[in-house]
Image: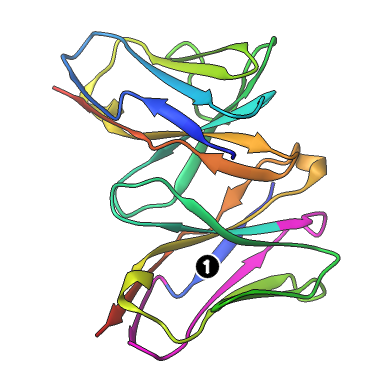
Amino acid sequence: GAVVSQHPSWVICKSGTSVKIECRSLDFQATTMFWYRQFPKQSLMLMATSNEGSKATYEQGVEKDKFLINHASLTLSTLTVTSAHPEDSSFYICSARWSNEKLFFGSGTQLSVL
Amino acid sequence: GENVEQHPSTLSVQEGDSAVIKCTYSDSASNYFPWYKQELGKRPQLIIDIRSNVGEKKDQRIAVTLNKTAKHFSLHITETQPEDSAVYFCAASSKAAGNKLTFGGGTRVLVKP
């Protein structure tokens, strides 16, 4: 149980395009999902908290218009990187809360913006 | 907000020896402390967690201890094996902070055969 699926696993795009990343909880319902960004050899930095049926909560310094989050159902949250630029290249990883505390992670998406 | 410090940043041990990673946290309201193992290019995997009402928890070769007074917790891996080589992250969260996890900086563990 507690499986989180994330797609795509990697994406290469041109500067200025938008990229959508999906995060699904496969065998449980997740009212809350979290989106993290991880640079090489660094820790996970929380970007935003995705709440089903309401607006996402963004961490300080994260542009909400740049990183659009939609949590339309109890099993799906999406992160759209709008007008991506090379500095947005990173490993993005989602997580879903199970049993009110335990957090399980998706497999991550490596984004490369040319 | 919560701040989690993790040490050491790198740890090299001989196969069969023990490895210890230490973390400190700043928010006394934190009450949940998980540990994650992340292999290169893969997702963090929850390996053990502890709540603030428990001082120690063990699962086979892995154990975690918590000192609430000192606000620090540690991961102990005994009889290390090459497959234990990975990056380990500690984290802390509290209900008051919406159960958001704050991660430590990570420890890169290398187990030499």
Label 1 neighbourhood size at 10 Å, few (<14), some (14-19), many (20+)?
Answer: many
Residue type, label 1: Gln
Identify the residue at image location x=69%, y=23%.
A31
Asked if B82 appears above or below B49 in the picture, the reply is: below
If the image is split into quadrants, where does the C terminus of chain A sit? top left
Identify the residue at image location x=47%, y=24%.
A23
Identify the residue at image location x=33%, y=70%.
B83
Label 1 sits on residue? B6
For label 1, the SS is strand
Q: Position of residue A74 (x, y in %)?
A: 65, 17
Q: Position of residue B65 (x, y in %)?
A: 69, 76
Please give the range of residues in magenta: B9-32
User: Numbered disc 1: what chain?
Assistant: B
Using the rendered view, name the quadrant where residue B25 is placed. bottom right
Asked if B25 appears above or below A93 in the picture, the reply is: below
Asked if B11 appears above or below B32 in the picture, the reply is: below
Tell which of B74 and A60 is nearer to you.
Answer: B74
Using the rendered view, name the quadrant where residue A109 is placed. top left
Identify the residue at image location x=46%, y=88%.
B18
Task: Say if the magenta span includes residue B21.
Answer: yes
The answer to whether residue B69 is left or right of residue B3 is right
Q: Position of residue B41 (x, y in %)?
A: 29, 47
Tell which of B49 and A16 is nearer to you.
Answer: B49
Task: Say if the magenta span includes residue A96.
Answer: no
The answer to whether residue A23 is left or right of residue B60 is left
What is the basis of the colouring in this image? Answer: rainbow
If the image is split into quadrants, where does the N terminus of chain A sit? top right
Using the rendered view, name the quadrant where residue B67 is placed. bottom right
How many numbered discs, if any? Answer: 1
Q: Position of residue A13 (x, y in %)?
A: 18, 17
Tell which of B68 and A30 is nearer to you.
Answer: A30
The answer to whether residue B56 is left or right of residue A23 is right
